[in-house]
Image (spheres, coloured by chain):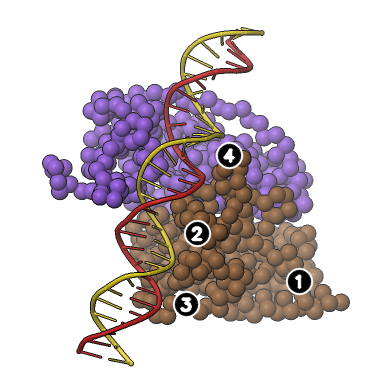
Chain colours: A brown, B purple, C yellow, D red
Amino acid sequence: MRRDTGTAKYSIRVVARLTGVSADKLRVWERRYGFPSPERKPNGARVYSDADVERLRLIARALEVGYRAGDAVRADPMSLKRQLESNVRVVPDVEESSVNPDGAVDRLIAHILDDDAGATTNELRSLANALGPQRFVVEVASPAVERVGAEWRRGKLAVRHEHLFSTILATELRLQHSVIDEDVGAPVVLFTTLPGENHGLGLEMAALYMAGSGVSPRLLGVDTPTDQIVEAALALEVSAVGISISTAADIESVEAGLLHLRRSLPTGVALWAGGAGATRVVASGVTRTVSWVELDGAITALKESEASTQAS
Amino acid sequence: MRRDTGTAKYSIRVVARLTGVSADKLRVWERRYGFPSPERKPNGARVYSDADVERLRLIARALEVGYRAGDAVRADPMSLKRQLESNVRVVPDVEESSVNPDGAVDRLIAHILDDDAGATTNELRSLANALGPQRFVVEVASPAVERVGAEWRRGKLAVRHEHLFSTILATELRLQHSVIDEDVGAPVVLFTTLPGENHGLGLEMAALYMAGSGVSPRLLGVDTPTDQIVEAALALEVSAVGISISTAADIESVEAGLLHLRRSLPTGVALWAGGAGATRVVASGVTRTVSWVELDGAITALKESEASTQAS
DNA sequence: ATCGGCGCTTTGTCCAAGACAACGGAGTAT
DNA sequence: ATACTCCGTTGTCTTGGACAAAGCGCCGAT
C-alpha cells in the first residue's frame, strides 16, 4: 500500500502509538540490536518508514506470544512471519497470560458493560497484535460480535453497548488493515452490501481476513445499488465480489439482488455471499462463505484459477 | 495526606498517567522551575507525593485554560486555584484560519474518478500529516465531502465513487484519531446520530476535530434510539452530546428527537446539533454547531463551564 | 526425576544534560 | 495599521549510562 509516491514517514512517538512499542524501547532496541535504525532528520530526529512499522508490529506480535525481545528483533522478518503463522507456541503451556481468546471475549463484554471504551480498545489491540489478522478475526472479532448480539437478545446488553462495541471494533479492524502491505500481484476482491443492508462490520472483518491472506480487498461501504457494484467491479478489475448479508436481511430481495449481480458480472468474476444471513441463500453461481473456513476455501480457489488463467 | 511518612508514593510514570503531564515534562519542569522536586529512591528514581499530584492537576487545568507553563508551575497553588475558580480565560479564542484547500480537493476528486483507492489514501494521509487534525478536517475532509456530494448531483461522480470516498475518508479519520492521545481531565462528549440517520462521516470528522482540541470524543455509531443516547450519556458522564444531522434528514422527527433528548438529559449536559441539516433546527436548549467555528465556540463554552463547576 | 536455590543475562524503564523547533510576544520598520 | 525580525518560552527529542525485575540455566539435594 501507498508506496508509489514516497513512503510515509513517522516520528518516534507515532510509531510508538501505532505499534505499541514505547519510545524508550525503540531507542534501546536500536542501540542493542541494530533495529530499527531509521533515517534521521538533519537535526537527528528519527524518521521511521512503513517497512519499519510493519516489521515492528510483527515483532510486537512475537513478543505477545512469548518470544524474547532480542530474538524477535534480530530474527529475519520473513521467517519470523512464518513462525507466527505456523501457530507454534514458543512458550509451551503458559498459564495463558494475555493470549487467551476465550477469556478475551468475556473481558471484552465486561469492558463494554462498563462503557469503558479505552479498555476495550486496549484489549482489542493487544489481541490483534498477538494473534495476527486472521486469528484475530476468527477467534476474537467474529465471536465477540456474535456474543454481543446474544447478550443483547438476553437483555444483558443495551443497544448502546452494541453500538459502542461496533464502533470500536470497526476502528480497530480498519487500523489493523491499514498497516498491512498489499502484494502487488494479489487478486482484488470488492466488498460491499446490497441496498437496504446497513451492517458493515462483516465487511470489515472479511476485508482484514483477506488482507492477511494475500488478497487485496476493496471496501465500497454499505447499502450499495447493484448496478453500482457492477460498475465498481469492472472499474477495479476485481477477481471476485463479496456481499455481506446479516440475519435481519430480507431474503427475497437479497436473492433478487444476487441474481441480478450474477447476471451482470462477467463469468470470470466470482460472487461470494457471506455473513450470518447467507445460510439462506440458494442462488446458483453464488459461492456461500458463511464460515471462515469456507471463505478460506473460496480464496484458495480464487488464487488457483487466477494462477491458471494467468499462465495463458 | 499525612505528615512525613506514610503518604502514597508515585513513580514518574504513574504521575504522568494521573496528571496527564508527560514524564519528560515533569523532569524538565523540575529542572527549570524547581517544581515538582520529589524525593528520590536510593538509586535516584523520583518518588512523588499526593501533594505533588494534587498541585500538578491544578497546573494541568491552568494550562488547559491558557496559562503559560512557567507561570502556572511557579504560581502559588492557593492563588492559582482562586484564579481558576474566578473563571478567567487568559487566551482569547482562536482566529479562524483562512480556508485554503489548494488544489487538494481537486486532486482527491480526480483520484476518486480513477477509482484509485491507494492514491486517495496517500493524498489524504499526507494532507493530514501536514495540516494536523483540525485543519485537516476543516480544510480538506469537510470541503471534500461537500464537493463529492456536489459532483454527484452534477452527475460527474457515481454513487459508487461517493461510497468509495466515504469509506476511505472514514478510515483515515479514525486512523488519525487513534494516534492522538487523550487528556485525562478533558471533558467527554458523546457523538451519535438519531434513529433513521445513517450518515456517519460527520461524526468522524467532528470526533477528530474535538480530539485535536482537548476534548475526549466518544463515538456511539449511527442510528441510535434516543433513550439509548440518554443512557449512554449518563453512563459515560459526558459533558455534552453531539448529534449529527444530514441534509436528507426528516426535520420533524429530528426536532422531536432533539426535544426528547433535551428533556431527558440533565440540564448540565449540553446538546449540540451539527451537520448540514442542522441549519433547520430551531429546538430550544440545543446549540447549533453547523460550522466549525461554531463548534469551536461550543467547545470553549463547555470547557469554561467545566472549569467553574469543577471547583468543588 | 523433580524441586529449590543461586548467579548470570536479558530487558524495560529511568536519569542527566543538552539541543532545537514551534510558538508567541515585543519591539521596529514600512 | 501591517509586516518583519528578534528573543524568550516550552515541549519533545537526543545520547549514553545505570539498574531493578524477571527470565534462564546450572547445580545439588531430596
Horizontal and vertical percent position of residue B9 = 23, 48
Label 2: chain?
Answer: A
Labels 3 and 2: the sequence-earlier one:
2
Q: Is residue A121 above or below residue A66?
A: above
Q: Are marks 3 and 2 on the same chain?
A: yes
Secondary-structure class at tag 3: loop
User: Quadrant where the C terminus of chain B lies?
Assistant: top left
Residue on which the image places disc 1: A269
Q: Amino acid at mark 4?
A: Asn
Identify residue for label 3.
Answer: A90
Q: Which mark is residue B277?
A: none
In the image shown, does B6 or D20 lie closer to the viewer?
D20
Mark 1 is on which residue type? Val
Which residue is at 67% across, 73% downward? Answer: A272
Labels 4 and 3: the sequence-earlier one: 4
- Looking at marks 3 and 1 on the same chain, the residue that comes earlier in the sequence is marked by 3
The residue pinned by badge 2 equals: A32
Residue picked out by circle 4: A43
**Residue located at (31% from left, 28% from top):** B74
Choose the circle earlier in sequence order: 4 or 1: 4
Judge by depth and name the residue closer to the eye, A298 or D3: D3
Q: Against A289, is B302 above or below?
A: above
Query: Mark 1 packing: few (<14 Cα in 10 Å), some, or many (20+)?
Result: some
Q: CA distance from mark 2 to mark 1?
A: 51 Å
The answer to whether C29 appears left or right of B253 in the picture is: right
